[in-house]
Image (cartoon, helix red, strand yellow):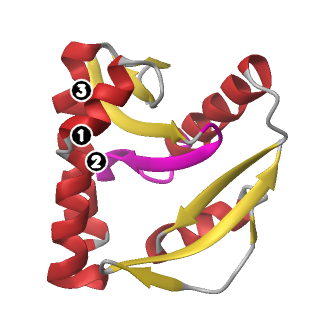
Amino acid sequence: MEELSIRRIREDEWDTAMELAFRVFLKFEAEEYGKKGTEAFAQFVTDTNLKKAFVGGQYHLFAAYIEDRIIGVTALRSGNHLSLLFVDGAYHRQGVGSRLLGYAENYLRDNTAFKKITVNAAPYAYGFYHTLGFRDTDGQSVKDGIVYTPMEKMI
């Protein structure tokens, strides 16, 4: 794989980052979520209030780049909650997701007092999070068609 870098996205990269998240969602998760969940996720990634929170510094969106092309994204909201982790399918199983998660964990350690990171893991990513040290905090749930298992990891 070519040289990978990770950094906070610029405001002008917002749409590209969210389009990648939605494209990956459609390919790997939408079937499990059905129409209601897909519509809810589409609404989330196009929410203007979410972008305003990003611009205001309350929503932290980081991306993995090869050269200037975004190949993966992750985000933190509510302080320590991982709200997105999507990697272009061509780069799955190459360590991109792990590196994005590590970047988010380092950000929390360096910039906050949080001692854990939380996530609502999609069924597709459930095993991935376990291999990285997350543990379930509750059973699988469904909200607005979004299927997830709440998890946490001490950092």
Q: Is residue 22 left or right of residue 98?
A: left
User: Residue 86, how many percent across, how many down?
Assistant: 39, 49
Q: What residue type is labelled 1?
A: Met
Q: Which one is nearer the viewer's eye here, 93 or 100?
A: 100
User: Residue 106, how many percent across, how many down?
Assistant: 72, 26
State how far apart marks 3 and 2 are (Cα).
11 Å
Residue depicted at 55% across the width and 47% down the height: 82
Q: Which one is nearer the viewer's eye here, 129 or 2?
A: 129
Q: Which amino acid does label 2 sit on?
A: Ala
Q: Considering the numbered disc 3 on the image, is that residue within a helix, a strand or a loop?
A: helix
Query: In the drawing, what numbered circle is on residue 100?
Result: none
For the residues bearing labels 2 and 1, Cβ distance under 8 angstroms: yes
Q: In which quarter of the image is residue 98?
A: top right
The residue identified by callout 3 is 14
The residue identified by callout 2 is 21
Residue depicted at 31% across the width and 46% down the height: 88
For the residues bearing labels 3 and 1, Cβ distance under 8 angstroms: yes
Q: Which amino acid does label 3 sit on?
A: Trp
State how far apart marks 2 and 1 are (Cα).
5 Å
Q: In which quarter of the image is residue 35?
A: bottom left
Quadrant in the picture for the N terminus: top left
Asked if residue 67 lies in the magenta stretch, the reply is no
